[in-house]
Image: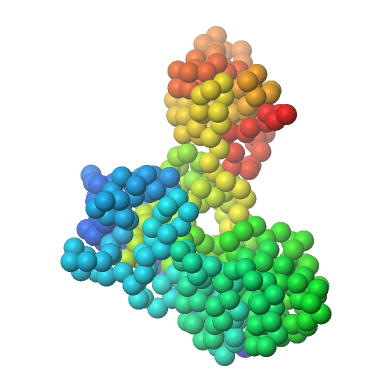
Amino acid sequence: MTTHYDTLETRPAAQREAQLMAALQAQVVNAAQHASAFTELLQGHDLAAVNSRAALATLPVTRKTELLERQKQKRSTDVFGGYSAVGWGSAHPRRALRVYASPGTIYEPETNRPDYWRMARAIFAAGFRAGDLAHNCFSYHFTPAGLMMETGAHAVGCTVFPGGVGQTEQQVQAMADLKPAGYIGTPSFLKLIIEKAAEMGVALPSLTKASVGGEAFPPSLRDWFAQHGISAYQSYGTADLGLVAYETSAREGLVLDEGVIVEIVRPGTGTVLPDGEVGEVVVTTLNPDYPLIRFGTGDLSAVMAGTCPTGRSNARIKGWMGRADQTAKVRGMFVHPSQVNEVVRRFPEVKKARLVVSGEMANDSMALHVEVADVAEFANAPDGLAQKLAYSIRDVTKLRCEVQLCALGSLPNDGKVIEDARRYV
């Protein structure tokens, strides 16, 4: 049996990087020419020189909240807010095939490119093959999830039953009648189906594999599926970007998709972190129709060392590790990770920082923990680094804050810039 979806998965790392950087340069030019939001965002940058990760890191990060806000502002003239290179009507020579609405409301386009969302790679890695019947339980209503997976399954060569969500008894009956080889959908709904089948006394022996996503997939649930004869593998993607990364039979992190460039940045900034450090997943898609450049997903993860034992040579991430939006409300004022990073930027002596909010609601306090090279030296210095930091925090946030100097490497590597440790009673 073929173990890889295509030869892109096993490219030498240097070849992949060269090809991705060439595609990046073409994509930023395309975005600036055909998506008005990026025409503005990329103004003043030498786009012809954006052919390296270092050059990419100089471009602004667009976070989902910013995309949503611009879509709302431009709704009367462009539902996509200028981020899409396609649309409909006489003003758009590049036509969309479908348009979707995700919670927010955020609108996303789709065109007729085969496997537009690039989900085939994840579905193949989950064990699906040409000729299989896939029972697809992602929603076909409003959001792209259902067709995102269906087009990916079709690219693999599968026949698809569009089960959608809900109607658990009918899902069980359809599985008993049609005998699908596998399930595609959220892991929690698959668990409900299996439990309902047991309650109905219906066996589902054909169901031996699953491609799951859309929510957390803990090892305990993976093992539960295995006990019921199902090998389930997760994919990680978004309605904006399509596939970002996927799990393989090695069960060691998630391998990055071949159609995206992924960076891990310090939350609230565009600063790229070293491999292994937890930060926000920022993705540049190479889709020319919806050319999102440095799109901040709001998810936390980290790049893993080495490559996948299955022979796939792309980088891996650890999977979903929480949310990067760590905004906290302290004494009636919102404090954002970007504000903490603004303070840190003023002091090159500070290598890492973490703002801890403690106490109880309405009686809370803040402490800024900062890593420095020599705690004793800075603690005893006459100019008082801690005092300067405290003044700076107050200047930026309008709130008083204690400062604690810490040794290098003492703060947790969990991507948190703001830790809310308050007691909610």
* 249 relative position to 145: left or right: right
The colour scheme applied to this rendered structure is: rainbow
The image quadrant where one finds the C terminus is top right
* 307 relative position to 113: left or right: right
Q: Looking at the image, which is closer to me, 120 or 205?
A: 205
Task: Work out whether 305 lies above or below 133.
Answer: above
Q: Residue shown at 62%/68% (left/top)?
A: 166
Q: Residue shown at 66%/38% (left/top)?
A: 412
Q: Looking at the image, which is closer to me, 322 or 109?
A: 109
Residue 409 appears at what percent x and percent y? Answer: 65, 36
Q: Looking at the image, which is closer to me, 397 or 317?
A: 397
* 361 relative position to 195: left or right: left
The image quadrant where one finds the N terminus is bottom right
Residue 116 in view here = yes
Q: How many marks?
A: 0
Residue 347 in view here = no
